[in-house]
Image (spheres, grey):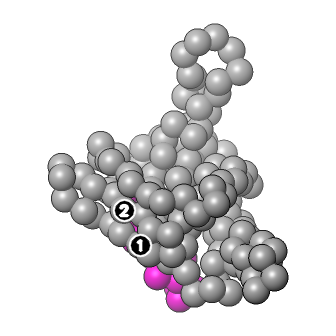
């Protein structure tokens, strides 16, 4: 499972010109599901996302997590994160999970995040989405589990 996280001041997702998900300070997570992923992968990634220390403390050091600051989480399904880009000039998606598997794990991830008490917003699975954000830093990390 792949997760590209960005520390944001705000982020939103639109579908057909309508906002479907929006957060203030927190993390924008672009979530990619691979064939080998199961619920355990989602649990591991959620643990990392919610506890990864990317927010600054009073000393200006990245010492605080999303949970520490009470930040919000915007989860956007991102099929292209599962691409193999090592060969050629066109990405291969042979390692990507099926749409059914990806949707199931995406929804599972969101529900588990909500169960932790995190304020969660989402995009719309498999839709053509426009994502707007203010990356704070910029701070961006690619997390794999």
Residue 118 falls within the magenta-colored stretch: yes
Residue 142 falls within the magenta-colored stretch: no
Mark earlier in primary sequence (1, 2): 2
Q: Position of residue 28 (x, y in %)?
A: 52, 62
Residue under circle 1? 23
Identify the residue shown where x is 63% and y is 56%.
138
- Answer above or below: position of 88 versus 95: above
Q: Position of residue 96 (x, y in %)?
A: 56, 37
Identify the residue shown where x is 53% and y is 88%.
117
Residue under circle 2? 12
Image quadrant in which the C terminus is located: bottom right
Report, in whole angstroms, how far the alpha carbon at label 1 lies from the one at label 2: 6 Å
Circle 1/circle 2 CB separation < 8 Å: yes
Is residue 105 rendered to the left or right of residue 13? right
Q: Is residue 53 visible?
A: no
Q: Position of residue 14 (x, y in %)?
A: 27, 55
Q: Under tag 2, what secondary structure?
A: strand
Identify the residue shown where x is 36% and y is 69%.
22
Q: Position of residue 122 (x, y in %)?
A: 39, 65
Numbered range of the magenta stretch: 112-123
Is residue 66 rendered to the left or right of residue 48? left
């Amino acid at each position: 499972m792949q997760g590209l996280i960005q520390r944001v001041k705000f982020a939103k997702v639109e579908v057909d010109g309508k906002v479907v998900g929006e957060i203030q300070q927190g993390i924008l997570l672009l979530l990619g599901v691979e064939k080998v992923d199961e619920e355990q992968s989602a649990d591991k990634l959620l643990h990392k996302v919610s506890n990864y220390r990317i927010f600054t403390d009073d000393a200006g050091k990245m010492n605080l997590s999303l949970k520490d600051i009470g930040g919000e989480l915007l989860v956007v399904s991102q099929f292209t994160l599962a691409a193999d880009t090592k060969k050629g000039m066109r990405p291969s998606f042979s390692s990507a999970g099926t749409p059914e598997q990806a949707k199931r794990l995406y929804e599972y991830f969101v529900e588990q995040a909500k169960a932790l008490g995190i304020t969660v917003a989402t995009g719309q699975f498999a839709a053509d989405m426009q994502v707007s954000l203010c990356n704070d830093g910029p701070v961006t990390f690619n997390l794999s589990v």
